[in-house]
Image (cartoon, rainbow, N blue to C red):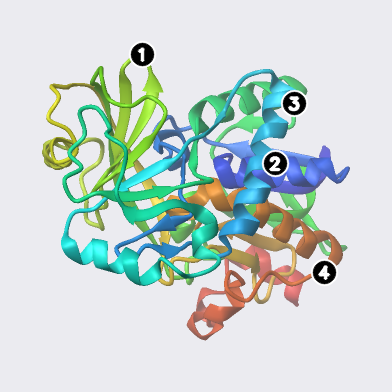
Amino acid sequence: MMGVEYLIVGYGIAGATLAAELRGRGRSVLVLDVARSDSASRVAAGLMNPVAGKRFALAWRADELLTAAVAFYRAQEQRLGQPFLYELPIIKLFSSVQEQNTVVARSADQPWLDFVTQATGELPTLPGVHQELGGLRIRRGGYVRVEELLTALTAEALAAGWLQHETFDWGQLVADPAGGFTYAGRVQARHIISCEGAATSQNPYFGWLPLTANQGEVLTVKCPGLPTDTVLNKGAYVVPLGEGLLRVGATYRWPPFAAGTTPEALAELTDRLRAITARPFAVVGQRAGVRPAVRDRKPLLGTHPETPGVHVFNGLGSKGVMMAPRLAQVMADWLENDVAPWPEVNIRRYLTLYSPANAGPPASRALRS
């Protein structure tokens, strides 16, 4: 029987960063992952944007999260010998005079100005871009080629034997009287960590958390002539991929939604792209993924209220690429050093939603009795 300290369920950006953090601390890890090509992490453009939303607010803990993210992705590039992180300015194109006024009102704020290199609304001419109302030039942004990163990390982990492709069955998790768990009669682990993305809403231990599946679709578009060294944003993001290709996204659909891509999303995203450029373009790909969305838009970190060895590291949502590396450190500090997760992400903020009726399957209760 295989014995490990940590059994991680899921290998999207959450599972991958947490596994790397724990292994970096010398801990033994086994990851079980179903390996879906349409997982949210693999579909997403991997955008890192410190200034976002209609109010152009500075993202939560932007400096801390971006510093850790850049360090993590650069380290993976050095280790794996291929590029993943592209640090590019983000041009937020104004859609209205009201947006212009919002930026003027923030123009003297700190630390907001640390992330903005041009807040006057005036931009240098961008070929092929509608910029009549000007825009905001944001620094310390960019994107990560998440699918390429996960592909490289997966190949490495499979070869080393600490990642296995299979569907995890929570019904086969049995609490050992002496502590820890046995899974499927073949793996013993001290801790189990759910990094399952939107599937966590069906998890018998954590289904009580306010996590909802949210579908997002993206396009790959051929449009030569647009800037290749800038991310554009106006109702949609436009990320340059090289060779005239762009990633355009993303839509937001709440349940119920259709499985796979939809003509509605295609129409929505092409309309948004036309609002950014008059250049002709051709759609060469469309993908859909399901992201985990949390009520207060903050991730979910912590331990099951009545089963000490079962944990969750999830709900990173659309900003997961920016947040995952630092939050993996926070989660590992909780698991290893008993340093509680930040209150904003600690699942204890939702304890009023928990009751013994959703305490988990019978196997978990053996540990509590």
Which quadrant of the rendered structure holds the N terminus?
A: top right
- Give the amino acid type for the residue marked by disc 4 in the picture: Asp
Residue 157 in the figure: left or right of residue 113: right
Q: How far apart are marks 2 and 4 (CA)?
A: 24 Å
Residue 255 in the figure: left or right of residue 89: left
Q: In this view, does 81 lie above or below 28?
A: above
- Give the amino acid type for the residue marked by disc 3 in the picture: Gly
Q: Earlier in the sequence, mark 2 or mark 4?
A: 2
- Give the amino acid type for the residue marked by disc 1 in the picture: Glu
Which quadrant of the rendered structure holds the C terminus?
A: bottom right
Q: Which of marks 4 and 1 is nearer the N terminus?
A: 1
Structural crowding at the residue carrying mark 1, measured as other residues with C-alpha within 10 Å and reported as few (<14), some (14–19) or many (≥20):
few
Q: How far apart are marks 4 and 1 (CA)?
A: 48 Å
Query: Residue 82 location, x and y as percent?
Result: 63, 19
Q: Kindly state the secondary structure of the residue where label 4 is placed.
A: loop
Residue annotated with mark 4: 338
- Residue 71 tag number: 2
- Can residue 199 be seen in the rendering of this structure? no
Please tell me whether mark 3 or mark 1 is closer to you in this view: 1
Q: Is residue 86 above or below residue 81?
A: below
